Image: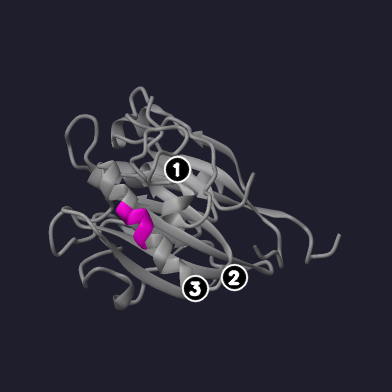
């Protein structure tokens, strides 16, 4: 089968690290980096999105050792340039950090402010790899359904002005309904997003599917699972979510 028609899949992981505050109430970034090194890196992700990974208040200073994370995962942060971060002390944008496999050719990166009473944002990249264009949106949506709907509408309007390509939405979407709820409906985002709903919160005994890996390609997200270990349950109030993203080189929607 030629390279133009061969289907490929990429590993994806997303994790809300709760600003490194663990189940014991201690803030310990070292535990977060141990989980990334020992648990997440082992699934060989090509895409890693982190939420609540910068401090909660301005200047939203970074909490983690990004050089250590890059070395452990083999991924590169997309936030290396000053304009790709909230500020000079931040590692990402309003707590969201996106890392990609170095084979991804990054063509465009945008930081999108999302409406709401609490600062929220999204990191939107357009990248190319293995003959396929892929848009990746990493975000952390509001706890309130009305605000989530506005935030998804904002993202839908933002990408409506961009070229059509396979789109992936990853992060803590705060949507507990397995079917996706109002905010994740086509009427707000502009296309239908699909992906298994797997409980990831709270980390000790998850029953809410707040963290998601979604694609606008039917059947494009598979093998979704919430990682679990004593180390994970101690490090954050969310479990990391992993999955596979199916893409077809040269495919367009």
The residue lying at 18 percent from left, 61 percent from top is: 60
Farthest residue, direction left: 58
Tell me the SS state at disc 3: loop
Indicate left or right for 55 with 242 as reference: left
Tell me the SS state at disc 1: strand
Question: What stretch of residues is rendered in magenta?
Answer: 150-154
The residue lying at 29 percent from left, 69 percent from top is: 85
Q: Is residue 219 magenta?
A: no
Farthest residue, direction top: 205
Please say whether residue 152 is visible from this viewpoint.
yes
Farthest residue, direction front: 187
Give the mark nearer the N terminus: 1 vs 3: 3
Q: Nearer the viewer, residue 180 or 167?
A: 180
Q: Position of residue 120 (x, y in %)?
A: 25, 56
Q: Quadrant of the N terminus?
A: bottom right
Q: Quadrant of the C terminus?
A: bottom right
Q: Position of residue 230 (x, y in %)?
A: 37, 27
Q: Nearer the viewer, residue 81 or 189?
A: 189
Q: Residues within 10 Å of mark 1 (few under 14, many from 20)?
A: many
Indicate left or right for 122 with 185 as reference: left
- Residue on which the image places disc 1: 212
Give the spatial CA distance, label 1 vs label 2: 22 Å
Give the spatial CA distance, label 2 vs label 3: 15 Å
- Residue on which the image places disc 2: 128
Q: Main secondary structure of the magenta part?
A: helix
Tell me the SS state at disc 2: strand
* Between marks 1 and 2 in the image, the one whose residue lies nearer the viewer: 1
In the rendering, which numbered label is found on residue 162? 3
Asked which colour scheme the image uses, the reply is one colour
**Quadrant housing residue 38:** top left
Q: Position of residue 139 (x, y in %)?
A: 36, 54
* Between marks 1 and 3 in the image, the one whose residue lies nearer the viewer: 3
């Amino acid at each position: 089968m030629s390279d133009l028609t061969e289907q490929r899949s990429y590993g994806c992981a997303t994790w809300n690290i709760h600003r490194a505050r663990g189940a014991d109430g201690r803030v310990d970034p070292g535990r977060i980096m141990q989980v990334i090194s020992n648990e997440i890196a082992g699934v060989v992700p090509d895409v890693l999105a982190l939420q609540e990974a910068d401090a909660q208040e301005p200047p939203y200073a970074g909490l983690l050792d990004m050089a250590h994370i890059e070395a452990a995962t083999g991924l590169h942060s997309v936030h290396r340039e000053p304009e790709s971060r909230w500020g000079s002390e931040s590692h990402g944008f309003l707590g969201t950090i996106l890392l990609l496999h170095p084979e991804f050719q990054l063509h465009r990166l945008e930081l999108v402010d999302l409406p709401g009473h609490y600062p929220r944002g999204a990191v939107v990249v357009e990248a190319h790899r293995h003959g396929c264009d892929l848009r990746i949106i990493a975000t952390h949506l509001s706890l309130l359904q009305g605000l989530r709907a506005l935030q998804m509408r904002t993202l839908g309007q933002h990408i409506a002005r961009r070229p059509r390509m396979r789109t992936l939405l990853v992060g803590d979407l705060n949507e507990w309904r397995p079917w996706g709820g109002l905010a994740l409906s086509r009427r707000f985002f502009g296309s239908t997003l699909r992906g298994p709903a797997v409980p990831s919160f709270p980390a000790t005994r998850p029953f809410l599917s707040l963290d998601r890996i979604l694609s606008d390609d039917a059947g494009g997200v598979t093998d979704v699972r919430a990682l679990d270990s004593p180390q994970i349950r101690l490090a954050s109030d969310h479990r990391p979510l992993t999955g596979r993203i199916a893409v077809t080189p040269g495919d367009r929607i």
